[in-house]
Structure formats: C-alpha cells, structure tokens
Image (cartoon, grey):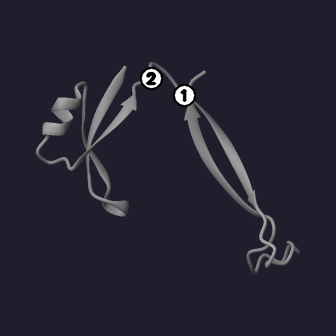
Amino acid sequence: MKIYLATRGEYSDYRVCHAFAKREDAESYKLGEGVLEMELHDGPVEVRYWYDLDWRAEWRDWQGDGLASANPLVNSRATGFRR
C-alpha cells in the first residue's frame, strides 16, 4: 500500500506536513510544497548498513594518528528494505 506525504522546506527546514492515502489529497494540501510517495509496511523493516571505501591517490595511507583524513576513507549509510 502506498501513502503520500505532503512536504515543505529544504535541508534543515524540511518537514513532513501530513500523510494521505490519495495522491490528489496530498497535492491539494495547502501547506505542502511537494509530495513524497512511500510504501506503507505492516511491520518492522530490516536495516542493513553498507560501507564504501574511498581511496585517494593524493592522500597518505592511514597511520592511526586521527589528525587528518587518510586512506581508506570510510563512508556508511543505512538502507531499509523488505524481504
């Protein structure tokens, strides 16, 4: 089942104003500036963490001093999905 979120703002001012069952209702919500379509789940959603290693040739290798960015630079992000 899909739900439609009436949203407004950008970056740190971004917020969800209201949730609707129909897209038309979300689009006609006077305080909203945009509509975000989402999937409504019946229960918990499994979260997996993905890691990216960036390697920059111009950076030195990691020495463990913690004072500067060094190779490898680790980025992580969480994604939720259903089985």
Q: In the image as oriented, which residue stretches furthest toward the front?
A: 57
79 vs 23, left or right, is: right
The residue located at (61%, 49%) in the rendering is 77
Q: Which mark is residue 5?
A: none
At label 1, the amino acid type is Val
The residue located at (76%, 80%) in the rendering is 67
30 vs 66, left or right, is: left
Q: Quadrant of the N terminus?
A: top left
**Vertical placement of residue 44 versus 17, above or below:** above
At label 2, the amino acid type is His
**Vertical placement of residue 70 versus 73, above or below:** below
Q: Residues within 10 Å of mark 2 (few under 14, many from 20)?
A: few
- Closest to the observer, 57 or 26: 57
12 vs 33, left or right, is: right
Q: Which mark is residue 41?
A: 2
Q: Would you name the residue on which mark 1 appears?
A: 45
The image quarter in which residue 82 lies: top right
x then y, percent, for residue 36 = 33, 40
Label 1 secondary element: loop
x then y, percent, for residue 61 = 87, 73
The image quarter in which residue 41 lies: top left
Label 2 secondary element: loop
Q: Quadrant of the C terminus?
A: top right
Question: Looking at the image, do the residues carrying marks 1 and 2 touch, with CB atoms under 8 Å apart?
Answer: yes
x then y, percent, for residue 15 = 30, 51
x then y, percent, for residue 65 = 83, 78
**Vertical placement of residue 69 versus 52, above or below:** below
- Closest to the observer, 22 or 63: 22
